[in-house]
Image (tube, helix red, strand yellow):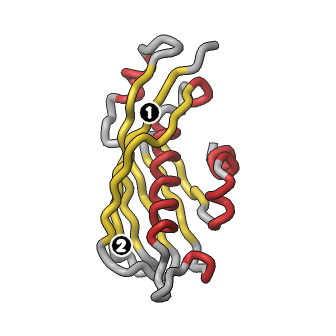
Amino acid sequence: MRTVVNDLVPFQKFAGVEVTDIAAGRAVATLPDSGDTLNHVGTRHAAALFLVAEAASGAALAGALRERIAEISFVLRESAISYRRKARGEIRAVAAVPDTDLPARVAQLPPGERFEATTTSLLHDTGGEPVAEASFTYHCRLLAP
């Protein structure tokens, strides 16, 4: 599943973001320490931080819904991110699906049904210092067979 997730979004690969771990409702993604993702003051660009946060969150959602993921289409509908401090070095985003009942509810839904899912993502720098936190709401639809 990790390989599929990493190949799914070309922009993610372009920026060097990699999902390194996917579990049930949890995922980890990294943004490498690269000059290509710096801003004008020499720290990680806000957009690069957003990208790694969303990559981890999408992967966490895929992990939560892994039993039916091939039947689900989801797109980002809403997001919020708070930047806590300047981000330097490699960035690690740890995302989770707070709604632990989501997989059971989705298992009961018929094809064509729509639903929303929310994730959170916490970002840390190389030293483990928190640099940002984000939340994402995805619009999801079960595909017809």
Q: Secondary structure at mark 2?
A: strand
Q: CA distance from mark 1 to mark 2?
A: 27 Å
- Give the quarter of the image for residue 67: top right
Residue positioned 68% across, 63% down in the render: 14
Q: Which mark is residue 104?
A: none
Q: Which residue is mark 1?
A: 139
What kind of residue is marked 2? Val
Q: Secondary structure at mark 1?
A: strand
Looking at the picture, does residue 49 appear above or below residue 97? below
Mark positioned earlier in the residue sequence (1 or 2): 2
Task: Check the picture and name the quadrant holding the N terminus.
Answer: top right
Residue 124 image offset from top left, x and y in percent: 40, 71
Residue positioned 46% across, 88% down in the render: 41
Looking at the picture, does residue 57 appear above or below residue 48? above
Task: Specify whether 37 is left or right of 95.
Answer: right
What kind of residue is marked 1? His
Looking at the picture, does residue 28 appear above or below residue 75? below
